[in-house]
């Protein structure tokens, strides 16, 4: 492998999907809904499939009907007119948008600040570009063990300030955060924004869970903060927005000078996205644009659907003996599993980190799969994730997990 790729190994997704195929547990690991997406979305794809004109290459920087729809939506949301040609790019999932944003801006030796726990691909993407990740962990406000909400996990202002220097190129923000479910407050975003402006730093804002935010929390787009539009690239995902993760369609929006670099990476690696998927997603966006204020709008109804599942999950985890961290957004819940330590046998697994041993033991012996959160930390801070497990609660199967979990209570 080239030097920047040295040390690469199969990710937690590769390993745990393999494990799930082998042991067939209730899979609350990888995040995706286990039920069909809204019917109008699958209808749109059927309609597109039967149109003979929509099966060839489309415009490289984004299918025209889709970039129009995305520009129209976000123009409303951020209160500024977006140019669909130059300020929006569609990509193969948010993954490609992240990859192109990082590769298109990070030079060899540049530092990139990553907030832990983070969606695991950020670190290798920064390293592949020759950049140096600088990590800062969200830490619980109190250490008395009563932490209950993702809002209890905060950034230390002084520590964050100390990471910014002349070499800092970018900070990667993820709100709502995966895996913690933290929704950054205006105050927290203002702190980050002020540091970005002071040190002339770019903000790459991963907002794929923007529509899954629980009352009374509000999703704030950092691009809307004073002086931030010019230095922010915001990333979204149709997979999360419309519950179609297999469509692998994402986007980035931001000022044309920043988007240009991303377009270049996209043009010379992928060139163009899938035409029928983009057309169907455009139809879906157009439908939602017509009913943004209504309860029927999927952007509003998805959170309402998730709310009882979130409550259910928190309750049964608590009943079983876990200590859940109730998320403010997204569809994952982290929980401290260590109160159950006496009831599990981790000696049969050989992984370095306890959360890997716990989740593997659970997959094999209790038939329930979760994700080990140390995958979401840089090597120095991995111990911070060891006592936790991440469960995905958008899945219907989460309602069957209770009986499995309750068996954990007696050793
Ligand atoms: N960012 C975050 C925080 C994610 O959880 C995911 C997984 N959906 C992605 C980016 C990648 O999204 P996509 O499936 O659209 O590539
Ligand atoms: N975003 C999803 C999750 O966090 C899927 C990630 C993946 O499969 N790479 O579970």
Image (tube, grey):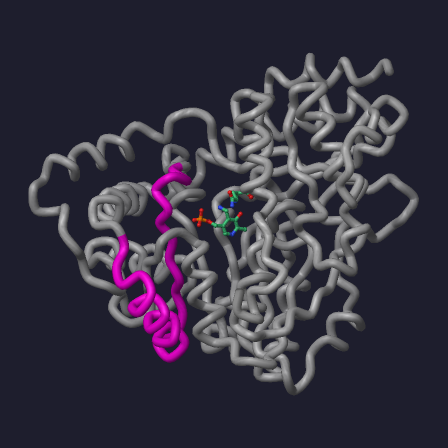
- Is 285 positioned to the left or the right of 381 in the image? left
Quadrant of the image occupied by residue 8: bottom right
Q: Is residue 393 above or below residue 267?
A: above
| Residue 388 in sight in this render | yes
The magenta stretch is 244-273
Q: At which x and y percent is residue 13?
A: 56, 42
| Residue 148 in sight in this render | no
Indicate whether residue 130 is drawn in magenta. Answer: no
Quadrant of the image occupied by residue 260: bottom left
Quadrant of the image occupied by residue 44: top left
Q: Is residue 405 above or below residue 46?
A: above
Q: Is residue 129 above or below residue 330?
A: below
* Residue drawn at the location 35% of the way across and 62% of the way down: 75
| Foreground pick, 239 / 291 | 239
Total marks shown come to: 0
* Residue drawn at the location 28% of the way across and 42% of the way down: 284
- Residue at the extreme front: 1
């Amino acid at each position: 492998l080239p030097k920047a790729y040295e040390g690469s190994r199969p990710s937690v997704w590769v390993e745990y999907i393999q494990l799930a195929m082998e042991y067939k547990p209730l899979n609350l690991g990888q995040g995706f809904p286990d039920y069909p997406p809204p019917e109008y979305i699958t209808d749109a794809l059927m309609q597109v499939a039967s149109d003979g004109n929509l099966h060839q290459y489309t415009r490289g920087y984004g299918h025209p009907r889709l970039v129009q729809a995305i520009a129209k939506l976000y123009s409303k949301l951020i209160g500024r007119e977006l140019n669909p040609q130059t300020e929006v790019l569609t990509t193969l999932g948010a993954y490609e948008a992240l990859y192109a944003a990082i590769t298109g801006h990070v030079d060899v030796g540049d530092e990139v600040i990553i907030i832990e726990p983070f969606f695991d691909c950020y670190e290798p993407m920064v390293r592949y570009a020759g950049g140096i990740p600088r990590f800062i962990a969200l830490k619980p406000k109190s250490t008395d063990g009563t932490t209950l909400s993702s809002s209890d996990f905060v950034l230390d202002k002084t520590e964050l300030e100390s990471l910014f220097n002349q070499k800092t190129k970018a900070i990667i923000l993820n709100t709502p955060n995966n895996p913690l479910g933290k929704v950054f407050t205006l105050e927290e975003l203002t702190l980050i924004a002020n540091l970005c402006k002071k040190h002339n730093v770019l903000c790459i804002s991963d907002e794929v869970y923007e529509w899954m935010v629980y009352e009374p929390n509000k999703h704030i787009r950092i691009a809307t903060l004073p002086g931030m539009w010019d230095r922010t690239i915001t990333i979204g995902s149709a997979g999360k927005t419309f519950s179609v993760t297999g469509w692998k369609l994402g986007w980035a929006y931001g000022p044309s000078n920043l988007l240009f670099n991303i377009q270049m990476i996209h043009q010379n690696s992928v060139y163009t996205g899938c035409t029928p998927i983009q057309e169907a997603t455009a139809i879906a966006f157009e439908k939602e644009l017509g009913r943004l204020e209504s309860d029927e709008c999927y952007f509003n109804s998805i959170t309402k659907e998730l709310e009882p599942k979130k409550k259910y999950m928190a309750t049964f985890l608590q009943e079983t003996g876990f200590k859940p961290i109730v998320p403010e957004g997204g569809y994952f819940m982290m929980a401290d599993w260590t109160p159950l330590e006496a009831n599990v046998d981790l000696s049969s697994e050989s992984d370095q980190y306890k959360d890997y041993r716990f989740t593997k033991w659970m997959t094999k012996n209790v038939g329930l799969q979760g994700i080990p959160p140390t995958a979401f930390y840089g090597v120095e801070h991995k111990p911070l994730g060891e006592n936790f497990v991440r469960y995905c609660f958008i899945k219907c199967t989460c309602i069957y997990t209770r009986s499995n979990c309750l068996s954990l209570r007696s050793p």
